[in-house]
Each structure stands twice: as structure tokens, then as C-alpha cells.
């Protein structure tokens, strides 16, 4: 090998090596540029070509009443979505879709040309619009052509996705209490807002994989994905009692041509709110059509002067503090009492001397003011605040009003102290007043108002349970019993509310007629008519408060609000299984004795006439249960009438076969039943 050849060989080797090194450096540089410098942007472009990220909106949990009836549910609807960067001919797509969706052409084109990877075209399509889009989609599939460059069709860039839509199947029933949601399913008012964290599910996104022509081949989307469903909220409200309260309240408002009204039904022993009605009503399905004032839950948010209903709390304070007795006499000054040169208190009627019981029965302003004066400012302030006036009740609901109660310990004006005794210069919410009333029916113990019983997961597991909670003892059981007896005289002959008593029941209550404040002066033409009461009076099952705003023609609570109370109380008691005392003696359904265990009443034996068989002993009367039956009792040996009284009035549908005495039944004794179930009872004549 010659030296020259070796020289050129070495040169070629060097040149090839340098070329390989440069190529390697270029590849590394290019790799660095594509992966590091432009990597994120290129990956985003690639993902847009092969993936569609679609939101999966959460499904709100249900709101149920205490019996499991649906008050707020989420139904499946479809929304139209699009991916603007993947649409090659938005003008043509706009021309075709605008008339189908009922959207203006300019508005739709603006949506389809936005610089966003994902847009909502139209939320919550009606069934008609959804069907029209699907028809257009089917027709477009037949004539669709592929884009020459990308092989993608505009049809694949716009499609329907399932979504949850909030619906209230009972329409306006408890509408203001439930509240409403926005288009994204987020609670804005009422219980929907208060329990947003429990009701609102967890949003997520799903990924759709596309092939080279842009067609969806893999989707991660699931309709009604369990992971996005929220919890259910079970209320203390009873939809039937709510319907009764709203119906009777609306009838009363219409009859007296009033501006509005409110009604509240509470169980005294537990503080559970069974019904919360107001008029005008609100349908949360169409919440935008109602003014904001109507959407407010006025029993909780509106503070009003209670009028003469406040007198019972003045009397209870005096009795419990041993400042007065029911028989103590008070001079009512023949209807006019001068506290000073310009400070005068009037009564609607001229009364001389009245006992404390008569002051409440006749509703004397002067008598109530003198009872308050005898109690003393310090003690009276203590009791009224213990009843819950001047502070929030603790209910879990947005916007509760605390009302207004002046500090009587520092009050100097004798007129302010006197007028407070008959409900002027103090403001309360209907909820505060009803809970304070319920305390008298609960042996003097004030309960915390309860509107929600429990939170339940979609799988039926109890997430959170709200037990009845007592806040404090306000008055002694003896004082509570005395007040019930005194308040019962209000609804008896000589009282101001004889129209408040349902036939066969007793009521312990109080009327009120409060002048409304217009500016800084009391109006002489606008009033609030009140009636609050406990029924039955001896052992109250319900505390009910009714207020009618600005009634026409009549203004007194005993004339306007008391009849509404009567109808709400009568229908509610019957539904709950309480019946007039004249018909049967109520007993607990679960403790109902079977005929075999019951002891027959002693029979008086009379000699039978000659030629005739001795008379058969009378059958034992079956007691009517006080509450709807939970288990099927043994009806063997009872007559058709007795079985009908026992079962049909307790919410069961009965089918009778044969005649005589009951010999068999379906379901069998001890079987769990629900109101509305059907039972079959067979009878046979006893020869």
C-alpha cells in the first residue's frame, strides 16, 4: 500500500466520521427541538386529532319527604356540544343546524367558530329539539363527505351528550323551601343551596378516542355514572300535610282577598317541621318567572310583629316566675289606661277586673301589660330570650332572621315595656313563634327546629342523621299544663277563637291582630291576622301557626286565621291517625291487642223468652289506631264494620269476602304493611 493511498483513506475516514457526527448532532438537536421546545404544543395538537375530552356533569341527589316521596329529582336530558377546531366548514354547518335547533344563524356561527377546543352549543334540549337533531344527523350521515386533507367529517365534531336536568315533580309544592338550581345543576336558593355539598355530585371528564378519519372508536363516557351521583336528602316535611297546609292557606288568602299568608306545622315533641306553606307559591321549575320576594322562605326570613299572640308568653313567664297565678285579678281600666300625659293603652272592649286566665281568653292589652309589669323587666327578658325570641333558632337553612327583641333590662320607656306585652315593638319569625308555642306543648322544653332528617347515599347508606335536639327547658311542666288549660279557654265559648276547633278535638291557642308598620307609623287599614294553637289541647300532637297578610273585609285573627287553622288541623290529624274523641278512643297501632288477648266486657244476662235461643254476647269493639298501622293486626272474630273501622281509616284498602265474622286474612297478623296497601279479609256466618 502506497503512502498516498493511506493518506486519502485516512481523509475519507475523517470526513465520514465528521458527517456522522454532524448527522448525530442534527438528530439530537431536532429531537430536542421537537420533544422539549415544541413538545407540549405538538402533543396538544396530536391529542386533539385522536382524542375528545368531554365533561361528564354531576347528577344531583334527590330530595325526598319523610315518607320517601320525591320532591326534587334529576332527569336525563341531552345537550349539544361541539369541537370548533375540528370543524372545517362552520358556515355550511350553521346554515343546516340553525333552523333545526331554533337558534339564530349569527349566534350559532359565533359559537361554532370560537377559539376553544370544546363548546356548549345548546344546553338541555327539549325532546322535540333532540329528535329534530337526531333526524338531521341521520340524514347527514347518508350524504356526508370526507375532508380531502384530514379525512375528517364536520358531522363528527358536533354531537349529543347526556346530562342531568333538575326537575320538581310536585311543581309548586314546598317550592320556596326546596329552592332551585342553575343550568349547571348548582343550588342557588333554599335547601338546594344549604345542602349543596351533599346533593351535588363530583364532576369528571371522559375521553373519546378517534380513528384516522375522526370517527369515535373508544369512549369513556357513561350515562349516569355512579361516581358522579350526589347524596339524597330526606326531609321532615310530609308532602300530604304540606299539600293540606298550602291548599287551605290559598283558599283563605283568596277568600279574604289578602296579600299573602303563611302556615307552619310542627311536631312539639321532636321539633320536626311537617309543613311549611306560604302564599303566593313558587314553582321551582320556572323560578325565573317569579319575583325575588315570592322566592324567599318567609316563615324563616320575614320578621313581623306578633300582636296578641305574644301575650301567652308573657303569661307563661309570670306563672313560671311565681309572679302571678291564673286566678289573680288585674284591673283592665274599662278599656283605657294612661301611663303618662300622652302614653295611653287601649283595649278593643271595655273590661273591668279580669283574672290572668280571662286576660288571655279575652285578649286584653291592658291586662297583659300589667302582667308584664308584675313579672319585672329582668325576669321577663330572661324568659322571652329563653323562648328563643331575639336570636336565630338554629335551623339549617340560609337567610334566617333573628327578629328583634329590645333589652328589657335597660329599657327606660314605660310605654315600650307595656306595648311589648301585646306584641308591639318586637318582631319574630313565624318559625320562632311556632317553636316557642311548641315548647308549651312539650312540657316546657324548647326543641331545635328540624327540617332534614338524614342524608342518604345513592346506595342507601346513611351518611348523616339529624336527631331531635332539645335546646333548653323554658318553663316547668306544671306551668306548661296551666298554660294549655288557659289557652284552651280561648277556643271555648267566651273566647276569641271559637272558630278554631275541629269537631271532636280540642285546641289550646291564641289569636292576634297586629297593625302593620307603614314607614314609622302604624297603619289603620293594614293588619296581619294571626292564630297559633296546639291540638289536641291535653296532649298536643301538632303545633300550628297561621298568619294572613292584609285581609280584606275582616281583620281579626279569630275570624280570619282561626278557620284556616281548623281545616289544617282537622285534615292533618285525620291523616296522622288521630280521630275525634266522639268516634273511638285512639290507641297506638303497635299496641293494638288481638281479640284473643283482649278481655271481653262483662255481659248482663237476661232470661230468654220461651221458645227462643239465648242472645249471643256482643262482640268487642276494636279500637281505632292513632297512627297508620305498621304491622297487620289479627282481625279474626270481628265484624265487617269493626274491620273497616280498624283498617280502612288507617290507610289500608280493604276487600271483603263473605259475611258474618272474620275467619281469615291476607296479609297474616304481624306482617309489615304500608299505607295504601290492599288487604283481603274473609268472613263466615256463625250459625
Image (spheres, rainbow, N blue to C red):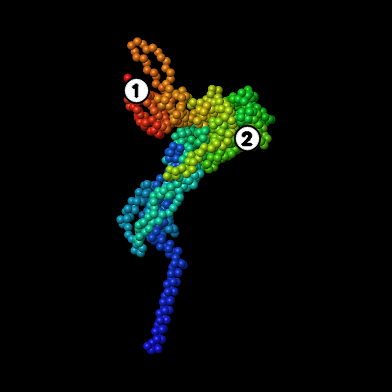
How many residues crowd mark 1 within 10 Å: few (<14), some (14–19), many (20+)? some
Depth check, front residue: 156 or 470? 470
Q: Residue at x 43, y 54 (%)?
A: 205
- Residue 220 in the image, given as x and y percentages of width and height: 39, 54
How many residues crowd mark 2 within 10 Å: few (<14), some (14–19), many (20+)? some
Depth check, front residue: 448 or 509? 448
Residue 579: quadrant of the picture: top left
Residue pointed to by mark 2: 382
Q: Residue at the far right: name it.
A: 341
**Label 1, label 2: how many angstroms apart (C-alpha)?**
64 Å
Image quarter in which the C terminus is found = top left
Residue 454, placed above or below residue 510: below
Residue pointed to by mark 1: 660
Image quarter in which the N terminus is found = bottom left
Q: Residue at x 51, y 41 (%)?
A: 296
Residue 250, placed above or below residue 224: above
- Secondary structure beneath disc 1? loop
Depth check, front residue: 408 or 94? 408
Q: Residue at the far left: name it.
A: 142
Residue 473, placed above or below residue 75: above
- Secondary structure beneath disc 2? helix
Name the N-terminal-most of marks 1 and 2.
Answer: 2
- Residue 52 in the image, given as x and y percentages of width and height: 40, 57
In the displayed structure image, the side of residue 107 where residue 144 appears, left or right: left
Depth check, front residue: 43 or 232? 232
- Residue 537 in the image, given as x and y percentages of width and height: 52, 27
Q: Which mark is residue 149?
A: none
Q: Residue at x 51, y 35 (%)?
A: 270
Amino acid at each position: 500500500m502506497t503512502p498516498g493511498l493511506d493518506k486519502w483513506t485516512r481523509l475519507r475516514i475523517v470526513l465520514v466520521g465528521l458527517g456522522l457526527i454532524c448527522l448525530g448532532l442534527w438528530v439530537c438537536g431536532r429531537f430536542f427541538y421537537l420533544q422539549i421546545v415544541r413538545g407540549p404544543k405538538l402533543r396538544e395538537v396530536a391529542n386533539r386529532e385522536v382524542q375528545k375530552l368531554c365533561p361528564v356533569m354531576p347528577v344531583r341527589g334527590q330530595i325526598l319527604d319523610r315518607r320517601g316521596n320525591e320532591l326534587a329529582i334529576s332527569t336525563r336530558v341531552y345537550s349539544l356540544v361541539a369541537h370548533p377546531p375540528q370543524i372545517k366548514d362552520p358556515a355550511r354547518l350553521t346554515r343546516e343546524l340553525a333552523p333545526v335547533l331554533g337558534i339564530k344563524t349569527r349566534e350559532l356561527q359565533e359559537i361554532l367558530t370560537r377559539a376553544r377546543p370544546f363548546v356548549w352549543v345548546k344546553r338541555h334540549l327539549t325532546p322535540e329539539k333532540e329528535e329534530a337533531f337526531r333526524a338531521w344527523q341521520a340524514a347527514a350521515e347518508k350524504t356526508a363527505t370526507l375532508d380531502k386533507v384530514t379525512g375528517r367529517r364536520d358531522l363528527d365534531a358536533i354531537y349529543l351528550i347526556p346530562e342531568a336536568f333538575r326537575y320538581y315533580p310536585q311543581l309548586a309544592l314546598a317550592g320556596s323551601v326546596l329552592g332551585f338550581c342553575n343550568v349547571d345543576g348548582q343550588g342557588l336558593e333554599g335547601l338546594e343551596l344549604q345542602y349543596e355539598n351533599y346533593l351535588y355530585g363530583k364532576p369528571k371528564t371522559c375521553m373519546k378516542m378517534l380513528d384516522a378519519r375522526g370517527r369515535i372508536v373508544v369512549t369513556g363516557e357513561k350515562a349516569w355514572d355512579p361516581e358522579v351521583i350526589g347524596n339524597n336528602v330526606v326531609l321532615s316535611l310530609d308532602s300530604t300535610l304540606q299539600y293540606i297546609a298550602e291548599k287551605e292557606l290559598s283558599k283563605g288568602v283568596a277568600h279574604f282577598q289578602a296579600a299573602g299568608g303563611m302556615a307552619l306545622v310542627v311536631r312539639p315533641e321532636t321539633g320536626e317541621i311537617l309543613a311549611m306553606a306560604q302564599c303566593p307559591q313558587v314553582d321551582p321549575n320556572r323560578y325565573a318567572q317569579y319575583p325575588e320576594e315570592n322566592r324567599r322562605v318567609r316563615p324563616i326570613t320575614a320578621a313581623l310583629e306578633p300582636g296578641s299572640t305574644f301575650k301567652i308568653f308573657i303569661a307563661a313567664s309570670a306563672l313560671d316566675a311565681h309572679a302571678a297565678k291564673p286566678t289573680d285579678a288585674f284591673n283592665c281600666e274599662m278599656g283605657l289606661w294612661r301611663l303618662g300625659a300622652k302614653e295611653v293603652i287601649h283595649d278593643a272592649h271595655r273590661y273591668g277586673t279580669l283574672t290572668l286566665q280571662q286576660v288571655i281568653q279575652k285578649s286584653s292589652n291592658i291586662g297583659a301589660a300589667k302582667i308584664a309589669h308584675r313579672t319585672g323587666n329582668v325576669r321577663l327578658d330572661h324568659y322571652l330570650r329563653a323562648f328563643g325570641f331575639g336570636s336565630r333558632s338554629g335551623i339549617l337553612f340560609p337567610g334566617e332572621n333573628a327578629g328583634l327583641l329590645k333589652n328589657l333590662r335597660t329599657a327606660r320607656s314605660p310605654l315600650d315595656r307595656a306595648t311589648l306585652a301585646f306584641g308591639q315593638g318586637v318582631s319574630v319569625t313565624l318559625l320562632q313563634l311556632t317553636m316557642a308555642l311548641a315548647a308549651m306543648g312539650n312540657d316546657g322544653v324548647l326543641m331545635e327546629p328540624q327540617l332534614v332528617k338524614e342524608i342518604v347515599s345513592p346506595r342507601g347508606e346513611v351518611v348523616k342523621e339529624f336527631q331531635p335536639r332539645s335546646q333548653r327547658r323554658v318553663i316547668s311542666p306544671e306551668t306548661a299544663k296551666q298554660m294549655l288549660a288557659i289557652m284552651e279557654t280561648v277556643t271555648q265559648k267566651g273566647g276569641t277563637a271559637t272558630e278554631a276547633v275541629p269537631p271532636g278535638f280540642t285546641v289550646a291557642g291564641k289569636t292576634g291582630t297586629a297593625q302593620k308598620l307603614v314607614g314609622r307609623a302604624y297603619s289603620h287599614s293594614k293588619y296581619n291576622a294571626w292564630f297559633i294553637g296546639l291540638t289536641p289541647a291535653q296532649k298536643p300532637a301538632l303545633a300550628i301557626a297561621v298568619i294572613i297578610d292584609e285581609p280584606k273585609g275582616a281583620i281579626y285573627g279569630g275570624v280570619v286565621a282561626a278557620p284556616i287553622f281548623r281545616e289544617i288541623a282537622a285534615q292533618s290529624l285525620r291523616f296522622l291517625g288521630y280521630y275525634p274523641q266522639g268516634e273511638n278512643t285512639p290507641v297506638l297501632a303497635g299496641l293494638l291487642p288481638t281479640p284473643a288477648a283482649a278481655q271481653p266486657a262483662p255481659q248482663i244476662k237476661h232470661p230468654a223468652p220461651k221458645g227462643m235461643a239465648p242472645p249471643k254476647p256482643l262482640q268487642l269493639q276494636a279500637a281505632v289506631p292513632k297512627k297508620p298501622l305498621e304491622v297487620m293486626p289479627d282481625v279474626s272474630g270481628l265484624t265487617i264494620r269493626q274491620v273497616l273501622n280498624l283498617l280502612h281509616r288507617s290507610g289500608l284498602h280493604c276487600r271483603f269476602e263473605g259475611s258474618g265474622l272474620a275467619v281469615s286474612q291476607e296479609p297474616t297478623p304481624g306482617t309489615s304493611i304500608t299505607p295504601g296497601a290492599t288487604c283481603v279479609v274473609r268472613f263466615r256466618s256463625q250459625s
